[in-house]
Amino acid sequence: MNGQRLALNRRLRVSPYEARSLPGVRRVSVYNHMVLPVVYETLEEDYWHLREHVQMWDVACQVQVEIRGPDALKLVEWMTPRDVSLCEPGQCIYVTLLDEAAGIINDPIVSCLAPDRYWLSVSDSDVLLWVKGLAQSGEWRVEVFDPNVFPMSVQGPKSGDLMSRVLGDSIRELGFFRFIETQIASIPVYVARTGWSGQGGFEIYLLEASLGVELWDALAAAGKDLNVRVGSPNLIDRIETGLLSYGSDMTLENNPLEVGLDRFFEMGKTADYLAREALEHIVAVGPARKLVRVAAKGEPVGLPRTSYALKGATGQEVGFVTSMVYSPRLEHNIGFGFVPSELAEVGGELDVVTSKGSQSATIVDDNWST
Amino acid sequence: MNGQRLALNRRLRVSPYEARSLPGVRRVSVYNHMVLPVVYETLEEDYWHLREHVQMWDVACQVQVEIRGPDALKLVEWMTPRDVSLCEPGQCIYVTLLDEAAGIINDPIVSCLAPDRYWLSVSDSDVLLWVKGLAQSGEWRVEVFDPNVFPMSVQGPKSGDLMSRVLGDSIRELGFFRFIETQIASIPVYVARTGWSGQGGFEIYLLEASLGVELWDALAAAGKDLNVRVGSPNLIDRIETGLLSYGSDMTLENNPLEVGLDRFFEMGKTADYLAREALEHIVAVGPARKLVRVAAKGEPVGLPRTSYALKGATGQEVGFVTSMVYSPRLEHNIGFGFVPSELAEVGGELDVVTSKGSQSATIVDDNWST
């Protein structure tokens, strides 16, 4: 039940790169009310190409929420347990936005443009509405709006080569999670050393939608002999890399400890935040369940529509898989799944139940081994 | 550039009716992070069938936001200029949710389940996050959550016949925008006299997702000789009926006066609301632009990806079309478009510029005539 044809209309906002990213695409998704390409050749071909060469991705759906004004930092701090005051202009940090129960609203990358100006590059939920709503909750001196900025991504081992051709060799020195304001082919952009792959790369934030195709073509021309091609966030690569997808591997029903995103912050930051009480309670008692990495030998299985059941030693259902895919490199299925915390030990044996039957699975470490 | 194939994953939430609504569907959209079928045979065949018979629609994507607690009414009132205190248990009202600048956040149907309990049946934006954010803005004694309720719709002239077979003849007496709690085939549901078509019908709110297929099959069996079939919100019918689509015909950039939704409320309600000052200002000075109905003779044109330009008498661009489709019944193109208020007179002559060139168009009244 995959592959229904998508009708495009005005409600699905247009990416400035559509004229280049939609022709030839095999599968798309919809993300933040925009079309997100997800497969071009096949998942596997896209994966190998991404690992060997360089790809250009239309990720305009990673929409930005701008928070600007004297209380901008205070409001960003209010939304997350991470200490955002450490983020200086030109720096990005990955945060979880939490509600009053420490449920995850979204997991954006925050870019500090100035001490009173932040962009939240959001995953798939209307963070603009959350921040606008929250902004009513005090005398915050802020403006909150969509700045109409459209990211594209350049990912893969040759991404430094490609970017240096349009920006000079100095771009190779840009630090991880740092960004600069610059121009590519005279087009004003921000360039960040970020991206949703494990292969390294850059994200380019286009400020003027009408120049999307021009930007795209400039990069494509510069990278011709690098075997650059259109690509997209790749399911195999992102699971191998341990990147969680909001809406799939975590939702508002989850807290950061459950899904292991507490590794990105330390409890006890100075600034106050909405989830403090709830989160401190969860830290004190420990999370009831945890998202673990699961490896399953045997026949390749596809991504679950919703989940695959995980069964324990005695055959009882103990949890479920949120994402799973066959890794042609590791030569087995890999994925994420929730299990009770007491079962979340590396080496733990489970069964994963797919449409192909029951396959034995093992809880593995961050290198996908026991 | 239509018809890209959609990849389904866990991030696109499952409708309880998918097993019945996805097989055979020709075009889908994504709406509130769920799949929304939009075409089965062709737009025109679906349209004629809807006008003559009865259809079952998977509109589970019309997700509900529940607001419950002693201050539930006060919070709903805070979000809209419409007087919600007039809405009694068992009644629904259509409202616009406005931000502090009177921009439209969403246009849900509000159902009053009890004086301290409301459902907002929302169009395509994460109203849950808006309400949760706003709920932090005072000492509101409310809970705000997704109650996991899944609407399906029964629309068309024979919808009363179909519903009376599963609920008895009394269901024909249910008033417009009224609802009851009942059971269909022993499945607990709410049934409302509502629906996003001009042909009349009902919406059924399923409370238990696992019973979706059972509910669907019970209705399908009961309506076999009524020529019931799977259908969907139909573009031709909804434009003919004058139903606006959030995200297409209005966005956060618009206020209710611009798009004519002020006909659903009177200014000056007693309860306080967030947009009061901004909205009173707009009423005082008048909106700068208005959404009008436009009819264009000539060749059939399709729905615009984003918009079609509207040109005035001297050839200058004065506005744009947000939605347009060919009506096989009216035998011309019909749509909505924004023009400056001073040009928004019925009878006004414009040109609409599509990929097929320029066609003369007329601003028409609510009956699509001048």
Image (cartoon, coloured by chain):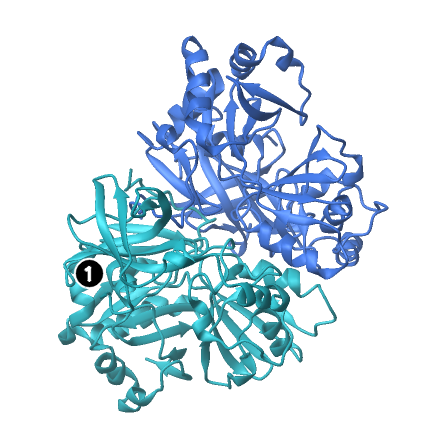
Chain colours: A blue, B cyan
Residue B320 screen position, x and y as percent: 36, 48
State how many labels appear.
1
Q: Is residue B356 left or right of residue A316?
A: left
Which image quadrant: the N terminus of chain B? top left
The residue under the point 54% across, 28% down is A197
Front residue of B137/B358: it is B358
Subunit bearing disc 1? B
Q: Residue at x 51, y 81 (%)?
A: B113
Which part of the image, by quadrant, shows the C terminus of chain B?
bottom left
In the figure, B265 relative to A160: above or below?
below
Return the residue nearer the eye: B13 or A324: B13
Which sits in the foreground, B358 or A105?
Answer: B358
Question: Residue A102 vs residue B328: left or right?
Answer: right
Q: Is residue B206 visible?
A: yes
Q: Amino acid at mark 1?
A: Asp
Is B333 drawn above or below residue A15 in the view shown?
Answer: below
**Above or below — where is B2 with respect to B14?**
above
Is B315 left or right of A30, judged from the image as shown?
A: left
Q: Which residue is mark 1?
A: B46
Identity of the residue furthest to the front in this view: B314
Element under disc 1 = helix
In the current view of this chain or complex, which residue is farthest to the right?
A: A270
Residue B23 visible, this angle? no
* Residue B179 figure quarter: bottom left
| Residue B252 percent coordinates (x, y) | 51, 55
Residue B83 in picture, x, y percent from top left: 54, 79
Label 1 neighbour load within 10 Å: few <14, some 14-19, many 20+ = many
For the point 51% across and 83% down, the residue is B87
Which image quadrant is residue B52 in?
bottom left
